[in-house]
Image (cartoon, rainbow, N blue to C red):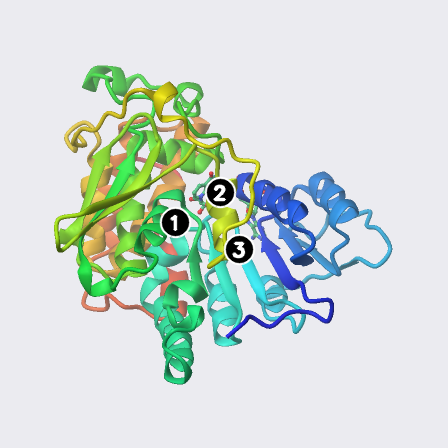
Amino acid sequence: MSLPSSADGRLGVALLGSTGSIGRQAVDVLERHADRFRVVALATRSNAAELEAQARRLRPIAVALADEGRPLDLPSGTSRVGGSDTLEALAVRDDVDLVIVGTGGIVSLRPVLAALRAGRVVATANKETLVAGGHLVMAEARALAAEVAARDPRDPQASPLAWLRPIDSEHSAIWQCLAGEPVAAIARLVLTASGGPFIDATPSELERVTPERALRHPNWVMGAKITVDSATLANKGLEVIEARWLYDVAFEAIDVVVHPQSVVHSAVLFTDGSLKAQLGTPDMRLPIQYALTHPERLASPVTPPDLIATARLDFRAPDEDRFPALRIARAAGRTGSRASAALIAADEVAVARFLAGSIGFTDIPRLLESAVARFGEGPDQAPDLDTLFALDQEVRAAYVDGTV
Ligand SMILES: NC(=O)c1ccc[n+]([C@@H]2O[C@H](COP(=O)([O-])OP(=O)(O)OC[C@H]3O[C@@H](n4cnc5c(N)ncnc54)[C@H](OP(=O)(O)O)[C@@H]3O)[C@@H](O)[C@H]2O)c1
């Protein structure tokens, strides 16, 4: 089945979070392949100047700025839309075939579900949507894939991953490793982690980490939240939960390996003992483009990895004593979606408070552990949307100020 496309043969795209780190790189990819993609809608929170510049370059039909009080100077042919369900409305527009999610947090959970229910392809960098709502999102992607498979099992859209396409580099790597492989042959997933800027820091050095130092990632340039998450390894914990949902693999079969060069983006161990990895220069435009053009590969501006210049690829086990956020996240994932949702709400608060100077770096995992114990337990570990959003608010309110 080929994806539906607009009259001129291009796929219509809605880009949520267009002014962020992922959003800007997605714009770069979309501009390079303007013969294939037509940007129909852009949405962001408050960066009016960048949204205006993007609108002038891409000429979308609709743009949304969540900060609705702020004026926008838009080119002719581009209209501003608004309202409480704007992201959902943009995601299911008739002229949108593919939704790219570059927002943080769970703000895009409703739009992702709406898009899938309306039969749109979703390419997501956002991990929180899967960490909190994996049970809801993957059910929709699997239903779409099953519908296609009933008609033609060899159709590229007969896979849930063709509908819910991962952009996160580790999950893109696993997806690429799985191309042409039977899912039943997966023995283990191996997620690589750079280890962040404090890979060799002592416990007392970690106590003194400043926001400025935590924001200096050795290999990747990303938004502030994910950069701090990489330094605490909370990011890797979220990615373990994300992988569990995307690939339907038990937590026990997902390994994390610290690999400081960030050249091996992740790997899959198959039942015959073969370990298949995807390598690349750390540049998010590659996984973004793969998610947009799958199953095709097109030329990209990304510098190919040079193994001789790289010379060394190091691997070591993560230290969960110095970086307990990884252990806490794994445990939350095992408990279920309620615990995972409590974890991500707490992590947003913890990172914001660390960046604002009200808690220290090592307080972040303490806050996460406290929030998961306090709000994540309970029998309902597959909550519905309203419960998830209520829980998100409850956790934020409990930790937004005061003690950890
Ligand atoms: N950056 C990376 O390299 C990378 C890699 C892998 C995965 N990810 C994941 O991708 C997601 C985004 O990360 P990022 O680093 O790109 O974050 P970011 O730089 O903070 O960008 C977030 C974007 O979302 C927008 N946004 C926030 N709330 C919104 C709302 N209510 N409505 C519409 N737009 C909203 C922001 O708008 P404003 O700019 O106006 O605030 C911004 O454009 C995260 O889940 C992250 O974990 C990122």
Location of residue 131 by image quarter: bottom left
Q: Quadrant of the C terminus?
A: top left
Q: Which of the two discs, 1 and 2, labels the residue nearer the N terminus?
A: 1
Q: Which of the two discs, 3 and 1, labels the residue nearer the N terminus?
A: 1
Task: Please state which of residues 358 and 214 is positioned toward the viewer in this rendering.
Answer: 214
Is residue 373 among the parts visible in the rendering? Answer: no
Residue 235 percent across, percent down from the top left: 33, 40
Q: How many angstroms separate mark 3 from mark 1 (CA)? A: 11 Å
Cβ atoms at labels 1 and 2 below 8 Å apart: yes
| SS category of the residue bearing label 2 | helix
Cβ atoms at labels 2 and 3 below 8 Å apart: no
Q: Is residue 82 above or below residue 151?
A: above
Task: Please state which of residues 234 and 258 is positioned toward the viewer in this rendering.
Answer: 258
| Disc 1: which residue | 172
Identity of the residue drawn at 19% across and 32% down: 318
Confirm if mark 1 falls within 8 A of ligand 1.
Answer: no
Type of amino acid under label 1: Ser
| SS category of the residue bearing label 3 | helix
Q: Is residue 217 above or below residue 264?
A: above
Residue 142 percent across, percent down from the top left: 36, 73
Left or right, 161 with reference to 19: left
Q: Which of the two discs, 2 and 3, labels the residue nearer the N terminus?
A: 2
Location of residue 380 by image quarter: bottom left
Left or right, 93 with reference to 118: right
Residue 352 percent across, percent down from the top left: 43, 36
Type of amino acid under label 3: Leu
Identity of the residue drawn at 19% across and 65% down: 184
| Disc 3: which residue | 292
| Disc 2: which residue | 286
